[in-house]
Amino acid sequence: MTYITKEELEATRPASEVRQWVKAKIDEIGITEEGKQAIRFRKGLLKELIEEALPLGIFCDAYFKSSDNVEVTHISGNQNYDVIIKDNRSNRTMLEYLEITQAHEGENAHYRRLKFKEKGYVNYLGTVKKSGTKHTKINIDIEDEALEHNVVFNNEMQKIVEAAERKSGKFYPAHTGLVIIFDDYIAFKNNRDEDRLITFAKNKILPMLDNFEKIFIVGWSSKIYLEFK
């Protein structure tokens, strides 16, 4: 089933409408159980809807203050940017393009979704253990464990480092900004955690990303929004 078309995904929208449109689209698709599963496993263009268009909406609310005078166009595919920006404000931004990437745990995220589908619940922090193959059947076990806050925080920082490394040293057009979206729901409890992230970013992230005009580290919950030149 086609849940979203390339034309829908690439339609030019005011910055003020992007997040609302993405959420409405996800709600529309998720009405059916089949749609919920497609969203959970990010099938086809739903991967870009959730991992690029939704972060774009969060970014637009924070950076462009949901302006009606900024237009963004999400470009689907593997080109060296994900978004074209047209800023019609008098004090327009220098940014013309955006690259969006997600700090994630790789294939383990997929295995957690499979376990959730099987059991109806999953430990978000537990260690993922996989055995078997597609031919012999893959078995997934996720430990039901609790972790100290500092361990959770450091694990999330490592995911951000890996996301930055994937974009380091590559060519991007002039005036391109990089948005790194990460999970701040559990790893961040207070302002001290945000201060630690700022210091971490300046020491570990920014030195490897001089191929971008600006760097943005943005939380899925919208609590964390950091901007660096």
Image: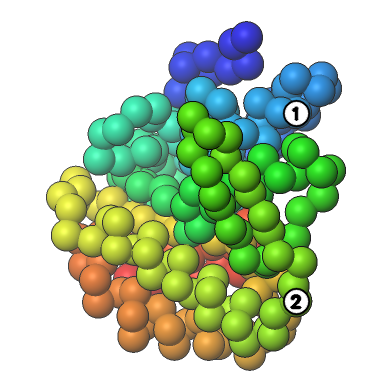
Give the structural element (helix, strand or loop) at label 2. Answer: loop
x, y percent for residue 10:
45, 23
Residue 117 appears in view: yes
Q: Nearer the viewer, residue 216 or 132?
A: 132
User: Where's the N terminus, which quadrant?
Assistant: top right
Q: Nearer the viewer, residue 57 or 100?
A: 100
Horizontal relation, residue 110 to residue 26: left or right: left
Q: Residue at x 57, y 40 (%)?
A: 138
Q: Amino acid at mark 2?
A: Ala
User: Where's the C terminus, which quadrant?
Assistant: bottom left
Q: Nearer the viewer, residue 186 or 85?
A: 186
x, y percent for residue 121:
82, 50
Indicate the quadrant where residue 72 lies. Answer: top left
Tell me if residue 219 comes above or below residue 42 in the rendering.
below
x, y percent for residue 93:
37, 54
Residue lying at the far front of the rendered structure: 136
Q: Amino acid at mark 1?
A: Lys
Q: Residues within 10 Å of mark 2 (few under 14, many from 20)?
A: few
Which residue is labeled 1 in the image? 36
**Which of the numbered marks, if any, corresponds to residue 145?**
none
Give the structural element (helix, strand or loop) at label 1. Answer: helix
First in sequence: mark 2 or mark 1? Answer: 1
**Which of the numbered marks, if any, corresponds to residue 146?**
2
User: Which-is-in-front pick, marks 2 and 1?
Assistant: 2
x, y percent for residue 36:
75, 28
